[in-house]
Image: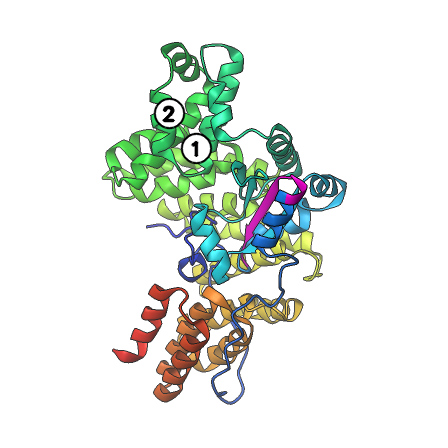
Amino acid sequence: MTTSFRLIAVAAVAAMALAGCNRKPETTPAAAAPTAATPAADTPSVKPEMSFDEARAKAKAQQLPLIVDFHAPWCYSCYFMATNILTGPQWDAVEKKAVVVEVDADSPDGASLQKQYGIKFLPSYLVLRADGQELGRILGEKTRAEFYPQINKIIDSGQTLQAERDKVKDGSQASVVAGRSVLKSYHARYDADGGLQWFAGLPDDARKALQNDTQAALWMARLHFLQAVKADDKKTALAFGKTVLAGDLGCERPYELDRYMPIVEAQPDAKTLIGEQQPAAQQLVEQGVFGEQPCADKRSAVFALFDIDGALGEKDAQEALLERAIADVEKDIGGDFKKDRNLDDNLRVYRDQLASLTGDYSAYDALMPQLVAAWPDDYVYPERWGKSLLERGKADEALPHLEQAAQLAYGANRLLVAELRVKALQALHRDSDARRVVAETLKANGPWFPTEAAKLKAMVNA
């Protein structure tokens, strides 16, 4: 099965289980083995300006929409948006007509809100009316040309999903346009059942008009595909997956490929089916990564083609693709690792995957201390580096980086880091230290993330 490194379908504690945004990490030589670090307090290192409740109260008092920005410290797409899109006069204009609150999905409160609103993709920008009803949501990385028309339309229209549904009455063009919007909204909510049930209940002329509209028909196919994947109906998923991938998906192609590839790999004619997707993936890379029409999420486009090349046994093509991607991102970074964390993380992942492919981690290990130094207040890079070393059988070198990460970790990511620390300590036969790490972490964690806490506890009680 291919390994995806895109940011797809995140659960409430996604930071703990997610491989996406998180290839492997590496390290430099370590000093003497340290003692276990004391877990950080159960809050992000940088507290938000407002809590969600404060922001909701402010929006209600001022009768303004509320934009909820769901993000996480490991989310490379979130850094792209924060650095490149949610800036400048266009963003200033948005903040004048809406209240904006940031929600860290790794914090206990953030995880609870993520579950409450069914957020399955980071970043997500949820827009609520002053009375709390949802107006719409935007998922993932977007260019300015994509993001601002969408967010302004959601804010300015003030239309809930029900209001938009009410516009779909017949076969008119106005009804078709509203229908596209409704289908897209259901897809953004990952509510395939709801969207298909709504469509089935439309008048005949409205259904026929949407079926005959190219954009609406593609959204319908995407809902059918999503529904089949969720139901583990491989036959139906395969059929709708082909239909979806034959459509004009633009920069969203990698996300649908993420759903399609695991299904195809189980088929007897897997190579043929996967090979059919290679030309479109190559075209996306040429245009959306190295061309004049860049995708916001270049990384997903690169790894979509990388996964296809790998499934076809084309290792030379994989190496060439990564080398080209590395050169492209290094040019953009220009040696300044404090400029754009999204670029930094793309470089880390490309270097990591190339090292995994070739067995040569020297360039990766040279990069990681620079990233740790550039972002010293964040657990992510010492954790990534320590994890990589641990996976390479270098527990003694991994442990100092994991201890550094533990000083900065909180919420869900605290449990992730603790799990890695325990593995490293056990590999070094330091079982008493491993038990101490578990005890300290569980005490700091409190009642949050019980499933993951139980998993951590089981590591020393086996």
Q: Secondary structure at mark 1?
A: helix
Task: Name the residue beneath numbered marker 2.
Answer: 198
Q: Is residue 457 left or right of residue 402?
A: left
Q: Which residues are magenta?
A: 61-72
| Vertical side of 61 occupied by 24: above or below | below
Question: Where residue 186 is drawn, which disc sits there?
Answer: 1
Instruction: Indicate yes or no whether the magenta region holds residue 13.
Output: no
Q: Is 378 rendered above or below residue 313?
A: below
Q: Quadrant of the C terminus?
A: bottom left
Q: Is residue 373 left or right of residue 17?
A: right
Residue 185 visible in the picture? yes
When asked about the image quadrant of residue 377, the answer is bottom right
| Horizontal and vertical percent position of residue 349 | 52, 58
Quadrant of the rendered structure where residue 374 is? bottom right
Give the class, few, some or many, for how many residues have Cα within 10 Å of label 2's Cα (few <14, many ≥20): some
Q: Residue furthest front?
A: 61
Can residue 241 be seen here? The reply is no
Q: Provide the secondary structure element on which disc 2 rests.
A: helix
The amino acid sitting under disc 1 is: Tyr
